[in-house]
Amino acid sequence: MQPASTRPGAFILLNDVQESPLSLQIVHYPHPTLRHLSKPLKRVDAELRKIVAEMFELMYEQKGVGLAANQVDLPYRLFIANPEGDPDQTEAELVFINPVLSGGRGQEEDEEGCLSIPDVYAQVTRNATVKVQAYDLAGNDIRREVTGLTARILQHETDHLDGTLFIDRLGPAHFAALRDKLEEFELAWQSRLETGELPGYDVIAARTEEMERLRT
Ligand SMILES: [Zn+2]
């Protein structure tokens, strides 16, 4: 729940347009990028803005309220949210770049799910109120104190950037109740690896390194 370590003071904003057919996909547990410690962005370019737009589309398609970059296999400290979960309410859309949480207060338990672990839900205790400092896509410094669902989303998504999943925050009894479902995900992953449907760990790691070289 404590925020990540390092962060740049600001980042370079670029407007170069690179033609690249993006096609992001939400990766599922136990994909290794979900366990990767995401690095702060030093560079925001036109392609990254396209990535953010695609992330919103994916999030709405899956009826989510928040999505972190490493859930689409990108190792960046960036997440998006819309606490309304409604694509028509664009004014509720939030983009957090290099977020740092602090000043967590109070405790609240509520049910959470995750787009990377579909159809798995559990009660998770989070701070009721939390402060966030981050940048938006235009490089504006955002400082807010949030409560309720927004506070929960910010904590869930910042956890993602640190390689932490909500299932890591469960007590033993709640975790045990999910064990069989998680094993199904692990077996499915293993068989997709074996059939070559998924790239190997070395291919994923090489891609992650290349993505980091580009913008962090
Ligand atoms: Zn999640």
Image (tube, rainbow, N blue to C red):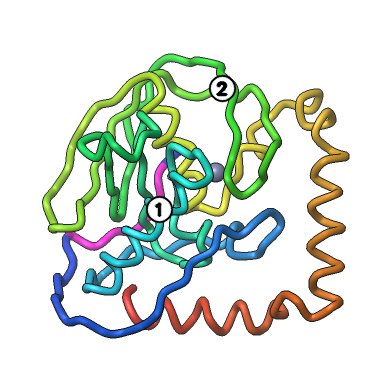
Residue 4 colored in magenta in the image: yes
Q: Does the magenta stretch include residue 115?
A: no
Image region (quadrant) for ligand 1: top right
Q: What segment carries the magenta color?
A: 3-9
Q: Helix, strand, or loop for circle 2?
A: strand
Instruction: Where is residue 177? Give x, y as percent.
Output: 83, 28
For the point 60% across and 60% down, which residue is it? 27
From the image, which quarter does the C terminus lie in?
Answer: bottom left
* Circle 1 Cα neighbour tier, 10 Å, few/some/many (<14 / 14–19 / ≥20): few
Please provide percent x and percent y for residue 195. Answer: 85, 78
The residue depicted at 33 percent of the width and 59 percent of the height is 52
Residue position for label 2: 125
Along the viewing direction, whichever of 134 and 190 lies nearer the viewer? 190
Q: Nearer the viewer, residue 85 or 132?
A: 85
Q: Earlier in the sequence, mark 2 or mark 1?
A: 1
Q: From this view, report whether residue 13 is shown above or below residue 4.
A: below
Residue beneath disc 1: 57
> Dominant secondary structure of the magenta stretch?
loop
Residue 210: name its quadrant. Answer: bottom left
Q: How far apart are marks 2 and 1 (CA)?
A: 28 Å
182 vs 44, left or right, is: right
Instruction: Give the number of the mark in front: 2 or 1.
Output: 1
The disc labelled 1 sits on which kind of residue? Glu
- What x and y, as percent, mark residue 89? 27, 34
Q: Determine whether the residue tagged by mark 1 lies in a helix, strand or loop.
A: helix
Look at the picture and state if 199 lies above or below 182.
below
Amino acid residing under circle 2:
Thr
144 and 28: which is toward the camera: 28
Q: Quadrant of residue 69?
A: bottom left
The residue that appears at 58% across and 45% down in the rendered structure is 115
Q: Where is residue 166 in the image (x, y as percent from the top left)?
A: 61, 37
Residue at (84, 38) in percent of width and height: 179
